[in-house]
Image (cartoon, grey):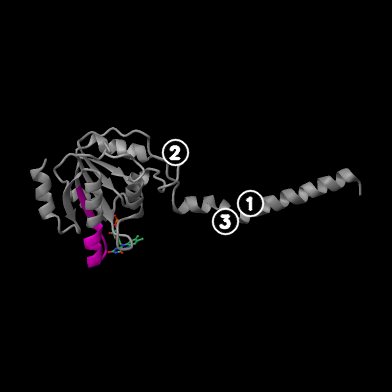
Amino acid sequence: MKKTSLKKLSLLVLGTAVLFCAGCSPFSSAATNTASAPVQQPAANTVQLKTKVLFINASRNREGNTEKMGERFLSGIDHDTLFLNDYKIYQLGQHFPDDQMATVLNAMEQADTIVIGTPVYWHTMSGPLKTFIDRLYELDRPLKALAGKKLYFLMQGAAPSKETLQHTPFILSRVASQYDMKYMGAATAPDNMADLQSVLRQNQ
Ligand SMILES: Cc1cc2nc3c(=O)[nH]c(=O)nc-3n(C[C@H](O)[C@H](O)[C@H](O)COP(=O)(O)O)c2cc1C
């Protein structure tokens, strides 16, 4: 066989192998993934709040129990909502150009009351909220975005353990004190918000 024909044959075999592998590789199954979970578009890099009260929802569900608890807690009070999952907040130590930690901080800076709501995952807050808190570590204090803001903490879970009910609000109270926020308290179930709601109303 001539040298050029051999080269063409090798290229054909190689090309067929590449095409076959592209179809069977787990890394090329975007079409399957897209069908079950639509690809999410990153949120804009600037957020303009319409109010001075910001509800940060750290749930993966836009209309889930955390959302319902937050809306009930804030009923009758004008507020903005920010879904943490809409923003790319990479892990502490990761530095990617499309990171949006600054966008979330900028939104917080515009508020004077911040309500953070999370579902209970594995006996504590959700991963996105934990990552957000970890990321504060690499920022200089005092942090303008947080200092002086009133912080209310909401959490709810299927059947949170007594340890969860104690230590998760404790973490948030520690964060508040580290970043010069005024910690106003926590509600740990939707039917257990009355006391914190009166604190909120007295402080609006
Ligand atoms: C990954 C994961 C872990 C969970 N771990 C707990 C848990 O440790 N304790 C608990 O009470 N509920 C746990 N739950 C249940 C959720 O907290 C509960 O369904 C909650 O209402 C979800 O809120 P959402 O509707 O805002 O997503 C877990 C749910 C998920 C998805």
- Give residue 51's position: percent from left, percent from top: 20, 35
Q: Is residue 150 above or below residue 185?
A: above
- Secondary structure at badge 1 equals helix
**Residue density around tag 2, few if under 14, some if 14–19, many if 20 or more, within 10 Å:** few
- Secondary structure at badge 2 equals loop
Residue 182 counted in the magenta span:
no
Name the residue furthest right: 1
Q: Residue at x 62, y 56 (%)?
A: 24
- 23 relative position to 131: left or right: right
Q: Residue at x 82, y 49 (%)?
A: 9
For label 3, being within 8 Å of ligand 1 is answered no
- Give residue 41's position: percent from left, percent from top: 42, 41
What's the distance in space between the residues labelled 3 and 1, CA to CA? 9 Å
- Give residue 188's position: percent from left, percent from top: 20, 58
Residue 167 counted in the magenta span:
yes
- Give residue 172's position: percent from left, percent from top: 24, 52
- Residue on which disc 2 sits: 98
- Residue on which disc 3 sits: 26
- Whether residue 60 is visible to the viewer of this picture, yes or no, is no
Query: In terms of sequence position, does the residue under pointer 3 or pointer 2 come before the other?
Result: 3
What's the distance in space between the residues labelled 3 and 2, CA to CA? 25 Å
For label 2, being within 8 Å of ligand 1 is answered no
The quadrant the C terminus occupies is top left
- Residue on which disc 1 sits: 22
**Residue density around tag 1, few if under 14, some if 14–19, many if 20 or more, within 10 Å:** few
Query: Disc 2 marks which amino acid?
Result: Asp
Query: Disc 1 marks which amino acid?
Result: Ala
Q: Quadrant of residue 120?
A: bottom left
Q: Residue 47: which disc?
A: none
- Whether residue 194 is visible to the viewer of this picture, yes or no, is yes
- Secondary structure at badge 3 equals helix
